[in-house]
Image (spheres, rainbow, N blue to C red):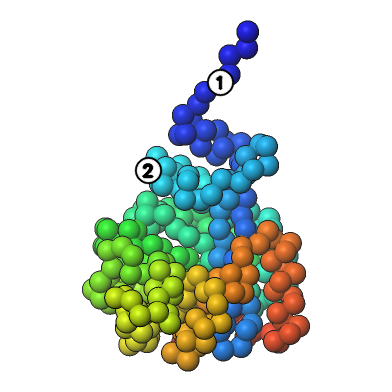
Amino acid sequence: MAVAKCFSPLADLEIAVRNREFIVHYQPIVELKTGICFGAEALVRWRRPDGSLVRPDLFIPLAEESGLIMPITDQVIEAVIMDLNGTLVQDRTLHIAVNLCAADIKSGRILDVLEAKLADTGIRPEQIWLEATERGFMDIDAARVTLTKARERGHSVAIDDFGTGYSSLQYLQGLPMDALKIDKSFIDTIGRDTATSSVTPHIIDMAKTLGLYTVAEGIEVEEQAGYLKAHGVDFGQGWLFSKALPAAAFIAYQRRTKEKYGAAPEVAQLGAE
């Protein structure tokens, strides 16, 4: 009688890393005042051998806890290059944002990985933006070193999911940053009379005071987009514009918006003069 194999979630994840079961979908990032698609956030998906997709919230925490998030991040970078190399070289207005884990922010390992993988591709460092969540700043001194090096190499740096972790004005003032991403939980309060609805304009004002670009996450309705545009938020992403798309669908989406709204300025490091 055959005995079914039973693996632990960690063992399953280790097998997935070894078998390279991770793919990337791309959620468009749009300039709110023009509608132009400037790029996308690279979002990892675990595609099981049967074709089913595992949601990131079901495996990313385990990947971070076990250290497997680092080889997964490497596979994400490789997928971006495989999916979009030609498009990024042909269209210098495009950028792709890649999420960094806390371990990579602390060690800086990912910068050499990026440099090696981008070599000979023709993709400019300025076209790869790096996003770091607040939990990556627990070791503030190490984070400052890594983010400084990242910007010296041409990458722009954004703080992701701002307001949901350990953030404070001290973090933003003390770290070399280019952009602040406003978490969906704050965008959801727009137009509602809630206890936290007044927080969003304060976050926007703080970012402006610090000279940071702003990106609003999770925009779902026109009312939210109109509010954010009126308050000077630079970029947005969310289902109002598009869900996360496979590479070919993202390329088609970006081309359609380019035809409709025109071309974006050539991409540059956000913080560059």
Going by the image, does 259 lie left or right of 95? right
The amino acid sitting under disc 2 is Glu
Dot 1 crowding, Cα within 10 Å, few <14, some 14–19, many 20+: few
Q: Position of residue 214 (x, y in %)?
A: 44, 80
The answer to whether 247 is drawn above or below residue 40 in the figure is above
Q: Is residue 160 visible?
A: yes
Closer mark to the observer between disc 2 and disc 1: 1
The answer to whether 271 is drawn above or below residue 82 in the figure is below
Q: Residue at x 45, y 65 (%)?
A: 131
The answer to whether 15 is drawn above or below residue 191 in the figure is above
Going by the image, does 271 lie left or right of 83? left
Closer to the camera, 7 or 172?
7
Q: Quadrant of residue 125?
A: bottom right
Q: Quadrant of residue 62?
A: top left
- For the N terminus, the image quarter is top right
Q: Residue at x 44, y 58 (%)?
A: 100
Q: Is residue 146 visible?
A: no
What is the distance, in whole Å, between disc 2 and disc 1 at their CAs? 24 Å
Do callouts 2 and 1 mark residues in contact (Cβ within 8 Å)?
Answer: no
Across the whole image, how many numbered discs are drawn on residues? 2
Closer to the camera, 195 or 24?
195
Dot 2 crowding, Cα within 10 Å, few <14, some 14–19, many 20+: few
Looking at this view, name the residue that lies furthest to the top.
Answer: 1
**Marked residue nearer the N-terminal end (2 or 1):** 1
SS type, badge 2 = helix
Tag shown at residue 91: none
Query: What residue is disc 2 on?
Result: 65
Closer to the camera, 241 or 45?
241
SS type, badge 1 = loop
Tag shown at residue 5: 1
The amino acid sitting under disc 1 is Lys
Q: Position of residue 240 (x, y in %)?
A: 59, 74
